[in-house]
Amino acid sequence: MENLSIEKNVKGYNGNNNFILSLKDGLEKYGRLTEKQLNAASNFFTKLNNRNSEFIKSVINPTQKNVNVNIKVGNYIAKTISSDNNLTFTPFLMTISKVLRVTEKAYRVVGKMNTSDVSSCRLCGRDLKDWRSHVTGIGPVCSKNLGIPYVRKKEDVDTYKKQVKEKIDKIGDLTFWIPKSQIKEGYDELENQIKNAG
């Protein structure tokens, strides 16, 4: 960027970056910026333009891909999904069916709570300890949070699984952003399916 262009960007800046705002004040007060300030401002506006063009590309050219991947998400995302959808539990295990957008650091996805056999609780992500938890995929505390009475004997397992599936189907598909760093299991499979989906 040329010096005049950089100074014009600084003068016209309306964002909330304190560094650029301080440069704007200095430019108004002294009428010019030092070479180091110009370089720093140039770097800032170059990165800002790159980010904005990436965002615009993702909005104009959305990446809708059909996939079928089971993932385990981190605690932060599970809590975000829960609060955004008014759930009384945190869904840690999800089956992703669509990828709507892909950015450098995140995916915008459509997913549903996982109903397949699992080794950790699909609602809190903890390891399952007793036989009931293993066959149902949910521990006793999370079962209570889900609003389904917990299994007492082996004969109740099929009925319990049916109730869980009905509850998950009633909740339906959830749409959310997930940072790539928050995918604890299933990241490689998701990446492969996105690439192979065309």
Image: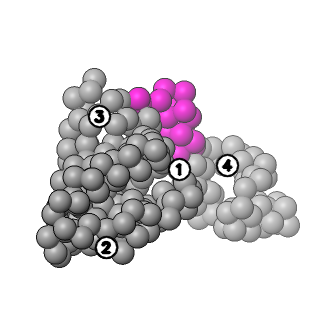
Neighbours of disc 4 within 10 Å: few (<14), some (14-19), many (20+): many
- The residue wearing badge 4 is 6
x and y, in percent, of residue 22 in the image: 74, 68
Give the answer, above or below, for where 126 lies relative to 58: below
Range shown magenta: 49-64
**Mark 2: amino acid:** Pro
- The residue wearing badge 2 is 140
Q: Residue at x 19, y 68 (%)?
A: 153
Q: Is residue 46 left or right of residue 10?
A: left
Where is the N terminus found, in terms of image quarters? Answer: top right
Q: Is residue 183 magenta?
A: no
Q: CA distance from mark 3 to mark 1?
A: 32 Å
Q: CA distance from mark 2 to mark 1?
A: 49 Å
- The residue wearing badge 3 is 67
- Mark in front: 3 vs 4: 3
Is any atom of residue 153 visible in this view? yes
Q: CA distance from mark 2 to mark 4?
A: 61 Å
**Mark 1: amino acid:** Lys
